[in-house]
Amino acid sequence: MQEVPGEYLDRKKESEEDRSKSYKQKEESRLKLAKLLLCGTELVTNIQVATDIREIHRRVEEEEIKRQRLEKLESEVKTSQDKFDEITAKWEEGKQKRIPQDLWDMLNTQQVHCAGLIEDKNKLISELQQELKTKDDQYVKDLKKQSDDICLLLERMEEQVKNVMKTFRQELNYIEKAFEVERQELLTSNKKKWEQALQAHSAKELEYLTNRIKKVEGYEKQLNKQRIWDWEDYNTIKIRLEQDVQVLEQQLQQMKATYQLNQEKLEYNCQVLKKRDEESTVIKSQQKRKINRLHDSLNNLRSKYAQQITQFQEENQSLTSDYKRLMMQFKELQKAMRHFAVVDDKQFREIWLMNEEEAKDLMSRALDVDRIIHTHHLGLPWTAPDFWFLRNVGPISQQPRKSATQILEEVLMQAEEEGTEETASEAESYLDLPKQISAKTTRKILMLLCDESGFLIESKLLSLLLPLEKNECYLLRLDAIFSALGIESEDDLYKLVNFFLKYQIYHSPSSQEQTSPMSALEPGEQTDLEGQEEESLVEGEPEEKETPPSPRLIHPNDVLKILKAFVMGLKKPRDPRAPMKLKCVQDNSKDSEYWEALTTVIPDTTQNLWDALYTGLEKYHLILTQRAKLLVENGSLEQQNTELQMLLQQYLDSQINSELQVPPTQVFRVPTK
Amino acid sequence: MQETLATSTLSVPSRSSVSTQDKFSTAGQTLSTGPRPPRHSIVPPPSKSKGWNSRTKFHQMRRTITEDTEWSLAIVPLLTELCIQHIVKNFQNNPLLKQLLPQHQQKVLNLLSPDLPLAVTANLIDDENYWRRCCTQRWPVCHVAKHGGSWKRLFFERHLENLIKHFIPGTTDPAVILDLLPLCRNYVRRLHVDQFLPPVQLPPPHGELSDSGSDVELEEPTTDHYQLGDLVAGLSHLEELDLVYGVKDCGMNFEWNLFLFTYRDCHSLAATIKACHTLKIFRLTRSKVDDDKARILIRSLLDHPALEELDLSHNLIGDRGARAAAKLLSHSHLRVLDLANNQVRAPGAQSLAHALAHNTNLTSLNLRLNCIEDEGGQALAHALQTNKCLTTLHLGGNELSEPTATLLSQVLTVNTTLTSINLSCNHIGLDGGKQLLEGMSDNKTLLEFDLRLSDVAQESEYLIGQALCANREAAHQRALNPSHFMSPVMAKGPENPAG
């Protein structure tokens, strides 16, 4: 019981003792039985093993004997074969024997040999038979042995079975006994435990009981105490609450009095309000009637209003349609007008051109006549008159104005040519440029502007300009600058140049006297652009000489300021309508002027000359005609003469003459030629 | 008269009067016999023959029933009893069983005679008790455990075996066996035939020595035995076939001719086992199977779907047969191979070893009483180093010696599947024994190691025995509680030497 291994104790706590004991017994029995079985089987199988080894030995021996036997047989076969060969050889020999004696001898010997051979074989056979017999005996012995073995085996098996049975029973008994003992022990121990537990239980029960009684007493005391204390508490609270009740009752009485008072007041108020209410109902009805009336009027007005609205809408619609129609008409009219204007313009131009051509034709004829008169009749040298209108083609009012860039181009072109043919170009340039400023100054100002205001040009353009020529480069740059500044036309450009010059004049005290002509120009410039041109035409030459422009006086730093001032100034006078009206008025005068100028292509002096010449020539012509008449008369007379001569001749030459007694020829003298 | 009428017809009032009488007269007796009547019903059958006599006596006794104190209803057979008796009597002509109530069925079965023709009983009666009576009547010793615990199976198997055993080709009508086939086909699972009689020219098979001697020469080509083909093809549940081509109890009439396994037998047997797909165990022992026949048989067994055990012990199989068996190992699910007491030598063992090296099915190999010698032994040992399946190896009586022992000792340290090795009757020698002991010291799985009569020193044999004992203990513990594998071993550790 006490020799339980520790590990086992852990596994089976509750039944450790029984388990260990029975288990031990079982284990012991098992081992014992296993051993027994092993030994028994070994004992039994020992026989098999023994026979096995015997069999092996037998086999080995058998093999050996077999081998020997085979060897023996082989040697026997060999020897007998030899003998047989010998005998057969002798047969051959015998055949050659002629002597019967010899033959007989030989046959005898052959017989002996054969007998020997057969004897050998027989011997061998007998030996083998002997062996067979021994083998048979052996077999019988083996059989016996085997039966003995089997008997032994059976015996052993039986014994084994008996033994095993016995031991099994024994062990079973042991195990049962062990279990029995264990059970007893277990029972006793459990009984002991049970009793102990019972005792412990009763003791504990007693203890609990006493404890409980004590506790009950203590609780009773506590309860009494608690009751007394609660009673006192209750009394005090009751007194306090009663006092409270009295106070509250008093308050209630007071409240009741005030309530009564308030009730009366309110009743009075109620009556007053009722009366007021009645009044208000009366007023209300009045108001209602009024409202009704007003509503009626309102409705009337509304209907009227609606009618009006519809009416006006209709009107409006008709008017708008009218308006639209008129607008359409107007537009059509405008279109037609424009069309007619264009057509008129065209017609006008055509007529102009036709008339001009005619006039020019006439003029050329007149001039031709003049020239012929001068050269042929008067014998004077003739110079062709040179007038501006001669070169004019087409209506003057329709001449296109040049843009700033074109001007620029021209200016620059001029500047280029300047070095080579300064004088020749000058004559041409005066036609286009404002006459107060030379091309050179313009160019210089522009160059300066170009150099200074590079910031107005886009950087992309700059990069594109690099590979171009200098002049083209300037041109493009200026173009960009002008577009930035808003300079579009020729006039703007001139304005700019003038502005520059003026600015310079204002700011340079040295050239103070030059301000007057320039300032006089100013109003003309701003109001009338054409006028400026005209003015410049008139005043061109003297002014140019007066103002030798000095661009080097304009400091590059001032250029920006000038530009700023110019741009500010330029914005003011932009009124696109004004010049249009003026233009129309100006047109007619100009045209009439032109046409009048055309009439005066032959001056009065020449006309007078022509008149005188005419009279002279007329007289001369008269004389000449008279002479011509005389000449004609003369001629006719001559002719008559000849004819008469002819007739005379005829007559003279005729036959009759001959026949005549007197020929007339003889009568007179025949004229000879 | 009235009383006789009443009692003869067994009318209700009389019964009630009887019962009341019973209660009154033999109160004490009824108490004891009350529960008996159903049991008593078994009593009449033995006295069946006396039935009529007793009835006549009954008539005579009727008048004195009231006076007869020993009379009771228990003596009167119930109508059901009578019917059952009648059914039993006429069972051969009119087998009524399935229609009866279960308890009546039981009664009928208990009463049926074991001599009834099989044609009636075979497919009708499943009761084990009946068949046990049949068996015990026919054979004094019956090992029902060998037949799957079924008496019916035992009866049919032994009956069939008996028929085959005494079948004489040429003289016995084959219909004798084939007629039985439809009756026994569902019950026969095992066929153990240890005798095949040869055909006989002369009526007495045990004729005189001189006659039979002369017959041997004449009959030699026609000594074919009973052809199992038809029979086996009919047995749909056959699992085991155990054959011995030989004659038992020939005594002094021994002739070699009686133990002849002819080629025709061999071919027909091969075809038979090939066609039998349910066969699990095939044994052909003591039949003089030589190499060629073994090859024919084994060839027919290649890729057999169910075969698990092949036993060709006590034959004349040599190396070629062993090679065929080796091939079979790799072409089937063979678990047990027994080639004991054959003539396998080293080459055959080597080919077996080669097949064994990578086999995963074979658990038992028996090469007892062959002559594989050291070469074969070494080859097998090498194969065992890679094999993970073999548990039992018998190499007793194989002329093995020390080299094999050294290799086997190495195998013992490596292998963990082998549980039993038999090296008895070899020449292991002292040194070999020591080496085996060394190998044993590292092995924890081997349970049996037979070294008897193999020239091993007593000491090492004893020590090996100790080691085996320890291994067995461990295995026992493992089997007892596989989950608590470690702790019991620890617990039992100190107790083992004491036990």
Image (tube, coloured by chain):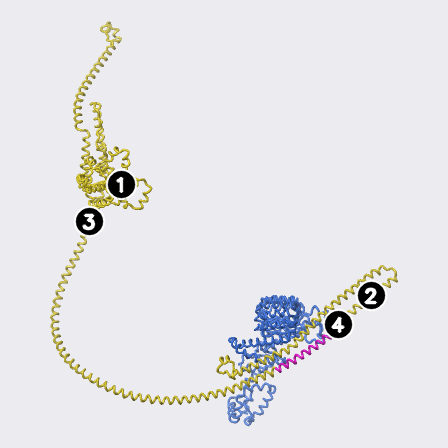
Does mark 2 fall on the same chain as mark 1?
A: yes
Is residue B81 in sight in this rendering? yes
The chain drawn in blue is B
Circle 3 residue: A323
The chain drawn in yellow is A
Residue A358 sits in quarter? top left
Residue furthest top in the image = A661
- Distance CA(mark 4)–CA(mark 2): 27 Å
What amino acid does circle 2 point to? His
- Distance CA(mark 1)–CA(mark 2): 166 Å
* Residue at (27% x, 41% y) in the render: A447
Q: Are marks 1 and 2 in contact (CB under 8 Å)?
A: no
Left or right: where A487 falls relative to B459: left
Q: Are marks 4 and 3 in contact (CB under 8 Å)?
A: no
Can you tell which of label 1 and label 2 is closer to the viewer? 1
Q: What stretch is highlighted in magenta?
A: A134-163
Does mark 2 fall on the same chain as mark 3?
A: yes
What amino acid does circle 3 point to? Tyr
In the picture, the disc for residue A113 is: 2
Measuring from the top left, give residue A622's x and y in whole percent: 17, 20
Can you tell which of label 1 and label 4 is closer to the viewer? 1
Callout 3: few (<14), some (14-19), or many (20+) C-alpha neighbours within 10 Å?
some
Circle 1 residue: A447
Residue furthest bottom in the image = B67
Does mark 3 fall on the same chain as mark 4?
A: yes
- Distance CA(mark 3)–CA(mark 2): 177 Å
Q: Are marks 1 and 3 in contact (CB under 8 Å)?
A: no
Whether residue A240 appears in magenta in the rendering, the answer is no
Callout 4: few (<14), some (14-19), or many (20+) C-alpha neighbours within 10 Å?
few
